[in-house]
Image (spheres, coloured by chain):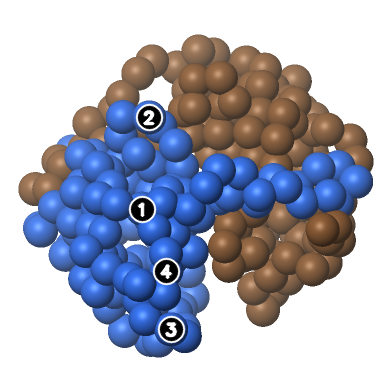
Chain colours: A brown, B blue
């Protein structure tokens, strides 16, 4: 069977969530959104492309920071409405300098614990915000 | 620091995507959506609760199939708009009988390959649809 990016199921705003996972360690790095063109770009280039909802434009992950994601495998789910992208991550995925964006653990009582250590100083990579 | 479920960032329809990952093997099992009450129920009960967008009601995963998800850890990301829930999965996560919902691999040329084998017959668990 062969499908086209536009045959995936997109939300009303034309987006599909894409979970990004480290292909080797299986750590989940981030979740971002793609439109069908970003899916096509990701498949064609072998690096992740997203649609930035806040900036309303294409976002080639790592373009400014150098922290690109080399695509190893793309999977979709039984509902065709979510992607799972296995990657080789350069540097770190999170704009806060952590390897994964998921570095806040939430306990049942609401207590938050920061997990891990940042790998880089965001100010040096992205400039002061 | 301590936060309440309602302090996470929800979309306009009041939902936050929750990635569910096997706590041991790190396999990503599914993605579903929670509202703040489902987040609270998940934290309080130690099993996953979602908001079903198609049925517009709470969905206690495994309630009909027995394939519940025992919560081991809940993480949130740097934008506070996605959850990562590490679980111990009973049976299989996917309603198609596969352990993970992500069992379709999409090659750059659009070719689709089914990965793995179903662990149960969906008709026997959920009845004929």
Residue B28 to residue A119: above or below: below
User: What residue does disc 1 label?
Assistant: B92
Is any part of residue A70 visible from this angle? yes
Which element is circle 2 on? Answer: loop
Residue A44 point in image, percent of width and height:
90, 41
Which element is circle 1 on? Answer: loop
Whether discs 1 and 3 lie on one chain: the answer is: yes
Judge depth for marks 4 and 1 and give the one in front.
4
Residue at image point 36% right, 53% down? B92
Marked residue chain, label 3: B
Which element is circle 4 on? Answer: helix
User: What residue does disc 4 label?
Assistant: B122
User: What residue does disc 2 label?
Assistant: B25
Judge depth for marks 2 and 3 and give the one in front.
3
Residue at image point 38% right, 15% down? A117
Q: Residues within 10 Å of mark 2 (few under 14, many from 20)?
A: few
Q: Earlier in the sequence, mark 1 or mark 2?
A: 2
């Amino acid at each position: 069977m062969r499908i086209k990016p536009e045959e995936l199921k997109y939300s009303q705003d034309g987006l599909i969530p894409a979970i990004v996972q480290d292909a080797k360690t299986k750590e989940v790095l981030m979740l971002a959104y793609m439109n069908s063109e970003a899916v096509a770009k990701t498949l064609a280039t072998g690096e992740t492309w997203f649609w930035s909802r806040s900036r309303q434009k294409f976002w080639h992950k790592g373009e400014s920071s150098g922290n690109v994601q080399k695509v190893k495998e793309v999977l979709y789910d039984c509902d065709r409405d979510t992607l799972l992208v296995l990657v080789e991550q350069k540097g770190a995925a999170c704009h806060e300098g952590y390897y994964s964006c998921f570095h806040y653990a939430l306990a049942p009582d609401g207590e938050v614990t920061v997990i891990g250590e940042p790998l880089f100083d965001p100010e040096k990579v992205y400039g002061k915000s």
